[in-house]
Image: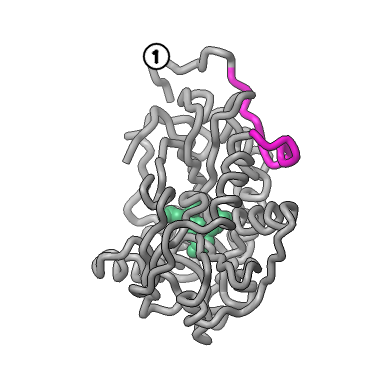
Amino acid sequence: METADLIWQNGDLVPWDEAQTHVLSHGLHYGSGVFEGIRCYETERGPAIFRHRDHLDRLAKSAELYYMELPYTSEQIAAATKELIRRNGLRSCYIRPLAYRGYGNLGLYATDAPIDLVIAAFPWGAYLGEEGQKHGIRAKVSSWRRIGPGGLIPHAKASGQYLNSILAKTESQKAGYEEALLLDERGFVCEGSGENIFLVRDGQIVTPPHVASILDGINRKSVIQIARDLGYTVVERDVARAELYLAEEVFLTGTAAELVPVREIDDHALGEPGEVTRHLQAKFFDVLHGRAEEYLEWLDFVEVSAKADRPSKVSS
Ligand code: PPE
């Protein structure tokens, strides 16, 4: 992976290689952590974090759902993130805050394990490849069902839950596809291993609802709003598996993936990205890069001096 100079760890900026944790940290053993994936884009007015507040709200909610008390407020985390971006001299980056149960005791009811909080910010290019972003990816419906509300909390972005996504992603990669599409426990379409999914059917935009065990994606929400603002009809409803093959267009949204067209599912060709996908993708990229006035309120600008003040020597 691409690295940066510093990582924010429990209140301190530490050199990247020195951001360590104890091997008996609770989160390492049980996946008892919650995290976010956030992106910051270079804009004409400087670096801007997309829907920063919404991501930090979701982080706080994920923590609350797992009875974890975050040691910092969203305001403190936001300020720390901006400082980290400045000190790393980054203009655009992926941001990964992670709160996990640290070192204290093992066992499932770990009252003595403190909650540690780290924030990393580093460059991360096109998640599913430049080619995929332009021409679409090949996806496969996974044999693994998405975690359901009976056993876990699909609405939470919790570390351990990602073992489910990892199984699905690994299966799809080994089978020669770029991404896995998961069905929910009932067998309806849910989402990608790290993205929400949209279909275009009869000119309408369709996306699975909350009861289909989706993660309440921030880009999903954004794209729904942008599409409606552009005059499209967006319907949140259950989607049958075969609709994936019958759709005029399919695309995925997520922070890492951004907006990626799907050109083939289970060896059914959908073809090159369609008109709706291309229209939404272009508008969405304008929004992310601060080129759409009407959505500027979604951007949290990072104040940097004209010449980014990159530290020549790192001190912790
Ligand atoms: N579903 C899942 C399971 C998911 O992990 C993500 C984000 C989404 C939907 C889309 O959510 P949002 O980013 O709020 O629009 N996946 C993150 C982690 C990816 C990774 O490989 O790590 C991300 O995109 O940052």
Is 271 left or right of 81, judged from the image as shown? left
Is residue 287 visible in the rendered structure shown here?
yes
Q: Quadrant of residue 219?
A: bottom right
Residue for point 43% across, 36% down: 122
Residue for point 72% across, 41% down: 295
Is 310 left or right of 58, judged from the image as shown? left
Image quadrant where one finds the N terminus: top left
Is residue 228 depicted above or below 174 in this figure?
Answer: above
Q: Amino acid at mark 1?
A: Ser
Give 285 or 144, whichever is nearer the viewer. 285
Is residue 179 depicted above or below 39 in this figure?
Answer: below
Is 28 left or right of 75, judged from the image as shown? left
Residue 299 drawn in magenta: yes
Is residue 246 depicted above or below 37 in this figure?
Answer: below
Q: Which residues are magenta?
A: 291-304
Residue for point 45% across, 76% down: 245
Residue for point 69% across, 66% down: 234
Instruction: Name the colour scheme.
Output: one colour
> Pointer 1: residues within 10 angstroms few (<14), some, or many (20+)?
few
Task: Read off the residue under disc 1.
Answer: 312
Is residue 100 visible in the rendered structure shown here?
no
Residue 146 location, x and y as percent?
A: 47, 75
Is residue 310 depicted above or below 3 in this figure?
Answer: above
Residue 89 location, x and y as percent?
A: 47, 23
